[in-house]
C-alpha cells in the first residue's frame, strides 16, 4: 500500500477518535476515500485516456478529410478567383474582378507604319488594357459553374512588330466590347477523382500549363512564355474536357479535351481540335513539380506548302512543359513544342498578312521570390527561348533566310499593396520574323527591344 494511502488512513482514524457526530464522520470518510480512490484510478488510467484522445483525433481528421476532400486542380491559369480570394455574394456566388494596364515602348519596331526620315525602322510607344470579371458557383461537392466576361482596348505595340511570337499576351483589342470568354459547368465523379467540364472553354488553360509561366497578368508577358507557339489553339469555343486524378496515385493526372476547331458553333464534330496530356508529379527534392507531356490534333483545312492545291489537310504536334521548385524561393520551368512542318493555316498570318508555319520552339526560365530581400509577395522572372520556322515554309518561299527567332524577357513584380502590383518588363527579340521581313528592298532584321510596365489591379 502506498505512503499516500497510509497517511490518509491515519488521518481518518484520528477524526474518528475525536468523537464527531456519527453521520458527519461517515460523510467525511466516504468523501475522502472517494477522492483517494479517484486520484489513484486517474493515475493508473492516464495512458489509456491519452490513447483514447489520440484515437478520437485520428477519427476526426479522417472525417474532415472525407467531408472536404480536395477536388482535382482545375485552374492553373490567370483566373482571378484562384489568385486572390473572390467576394462571396448571395447564394454562394464568388466574384473576382481585375484590370490590367500595359505600356510598352519598342525600339526598332520593324513594322511601324510611320517612318522617320530615311530610316526604315522606328521607335514607338503604345498602351493597352483589359478587364476581367469572373463568377463562380460551387454546387456542394459535386459540381462547379464558371463564367468569365472580358473587355479591353488597344493592340499595344504588337501590330507594329513583324515577329513569329509577339510581346503582349494580355492585349484585348476588342474596342471596349464585352465578350463572354468562358461559360462552363464542371461535374465531379468517383469521389472527385474524375471531373468533366462542358460549355464554352479556353483551350489554352487546359494544356501546356506552368506554375510560373502561364499568367500574363502577373508573370511573363511574351507569348512564347505563356504557351508554346507551335500549338494551333482555336479561339474560346464549344468543347468538353475531362481530368482524371486517381486518389491512390496522387503523383499523376490525365486530361483530354475536344473542341470545335474552327469556332463557328456549326457542325462542331466536323472540324475538331483535341489535346491529350499526362502530368507526372514525382516530388523531387520533396518539393512541388509538374512534368507534363501532351499531344494535339487539329482538322481545320490546312494547306500543303509543297502543293497548294491540297487545302483540306490536318495538323498535329506534341510538347513538354516542366516546372520544378528547387528551393522555398526559387522555381524553374522549361518548354518544348513540335508541330507538323508540311502544312500551314491560311487564316493565321503575321502583322503584315504573311503566311508562315512553325516547326519547333523551346524556352527555359526561372522565378525568384522576394522573401530573401524582405519582399515575400514580390518575385523576379527571367526567361529565354527560340521559335524555329518549318523547313517546308523556307523551301516554299523566295530567298527566305528563315532564321530562328530568339526571345529574352526579364520582369520584376512589385506587390505595392493587397490590390495593386506593378511589373517593369524588358523583352529583346533577335532575328525577328526569321530576318525575312523586307520593306522597299531592305530587310528589317535589327534586334527589337521592348521596354514596358504592367499594372495589375485586383478588386
Image (cartoon, helix red, strand yellow):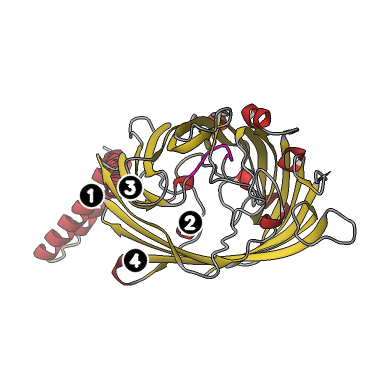
Dot 2 crowding, Cα within 10 Å, few <14, some 14–19, many 20+: some
Which mark is nearer the camera, 1 or 4? Answer: 4
Residue 100 in view:
no
Q: What residue is pinned by disc 2? A: 79
SS at circle 2:
loop
Gap between marks 1 and 4, in whole Å? 55 Å
Label disc, if present, on residue 93 of the rendered structure: 4
Which mark is nearer the camera, 3 or 2? Answer: 3
N-terminal-most mark, 2 or 4:
2
Label disc, if present, on residue 231 of the rendered structure: none
Q: What residue is pinned by disc 3? A: 197
Label disc, if present, on residue 38 of the rendered structure: 1
Dot 3 crowding, Cα within 10 Å, few <14, some 14–19, many 20+: many
Gap between marks 3 and 2, in whole Å? 16 Å
SS at circle 4:
strand
Q: Is residue 217 left or right of residue 135?
A: right
Q: Is residue 414 left or right of residue 215?
A: right
Amino acid at each position: 500500500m502506498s505512503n499516500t494511502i497510509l497517511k490518509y488512513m491515519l488521518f481518518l482514524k484520528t477524526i474518528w477518535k475525536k468523537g464527531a457526530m456519527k453521520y458527519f464522520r461517515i460523510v467525511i470518510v466516504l468523501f475522502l476515500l472517494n477522492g483517494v480512490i479517484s486520484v489513484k484510478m486517474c493515475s493508473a488510467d492516464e495512458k489509456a485516456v491519452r490513447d483514447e484522445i489520440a484515437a478520437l483525433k485520428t477519427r476526426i481528421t479522417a472525417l474532415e478529410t472525407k467531408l472536404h476532400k480536395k477536388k482535382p486542380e482545375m485552374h492553373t491559369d490567370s483566373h482571378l478567383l484562384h489568385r486572390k480570394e473572390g467576394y462571396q455574394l448571395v447564394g454562394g456566388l464568388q466574384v473576382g474582378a481585375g484590370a490590367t494596364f500595359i505600356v510598352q515602348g519598342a525600339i526598332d519596331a520593324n513594322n511601324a507604319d510611320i517612318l522617320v526620315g530615311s530610316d526604315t525602322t522606328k521607335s514607338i510607344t503604345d498602351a493597352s488594357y483589359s478587364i476581367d470579371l469572373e463568377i463562380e458557383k460551387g454546387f456542394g461537392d459535386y459540381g462547379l459553374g464558371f463564367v468569365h466576361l472580358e473587355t479591353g482596348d488597344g493592340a499595344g505595340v504588337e501590330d507594329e512588330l513583324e515577329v513569329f511570337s509577339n510581346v503582349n499576351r494580355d492585349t484585348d483589342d476588342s474596342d471596349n466590347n464585352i465578350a463572354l470568354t468562358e461559360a462552363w459547368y464542371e461535374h465531379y465523379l468517383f469521389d472527385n477523382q474524375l471531373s468533366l467540364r462542358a460549355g464554352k472553354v479556353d483551350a489554352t488553360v487546359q494544356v501546356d500549363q506552368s506554375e510560373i509561366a502561364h499568367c500574363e497578368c502577373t508573370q511573363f508577358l511574351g507569348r512564347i512564355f505563356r504557351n508554346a507557339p507551335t500549338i494551333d489553339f482555336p479561339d474560346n469555343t464549344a468543347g468538353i474536357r475531362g481530368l482524371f486524378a486517381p486518389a491512390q496515385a496522387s503523383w499523376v493526372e490525365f486530361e483530354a479535351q475536344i473542341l470545335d476547331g474552327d469556332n463557328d458553333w456549326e457542325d462542331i464534330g466536323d472540324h475538331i481540335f483535341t489535346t491529350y496530356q499526362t502530368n507526372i508529379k514525382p516530388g523531387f527534392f520533396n518539393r512541388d513539380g509538374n512534368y507534363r507531356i501532351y499531344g494535339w490534333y487539329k482538322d481545320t483545312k490546312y494547306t500543303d506548302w509543297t502543293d497548294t492545291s491540297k487545302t483540306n489537310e490536318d495538323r498535329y504536334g506534341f510538347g513538354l512543359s516542366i516546372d520544378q521548385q528547387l528551393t522555398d524561393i526559387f522555381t524553374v520551368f522549361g518548354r518544348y513544342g513540335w508541330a507538323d512542318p508540311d502544312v500551314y493555316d491560311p487564316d493565321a498570318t503575321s502583322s503584315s498578312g504573311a503566311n508562315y508555319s512553325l516547326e519547333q520552339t523551346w524556352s527555359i526560365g526561372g522565378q525568384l521570390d522576394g522573401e530573401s530581400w524582405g519582399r515575400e509577395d514580390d518575385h523576379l522572372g527571367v526567361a529565354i527561348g527560340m521559335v524555329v520556322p518549318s523547313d517546308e515554309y523556307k523551301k516554299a518561299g523566295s530567298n527566305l533566310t528563315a532564321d530562328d527567332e530568339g526571345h529574352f524577357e526579364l520582369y520584376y513584380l512589385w506587390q505595392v499593396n493587397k490590390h495593386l502590383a506593378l511589373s517593369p518588363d524588358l523583352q529583346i527579340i533577335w532575328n525577328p520574323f526569321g530576318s525575312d521581313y523586307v520593306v522597299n528592298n531592305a530587310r528589317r532584321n535589327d534586334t527589337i527591344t521592348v521596354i514596358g510596365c504592367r499594372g495589375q489591379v485586383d478588386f
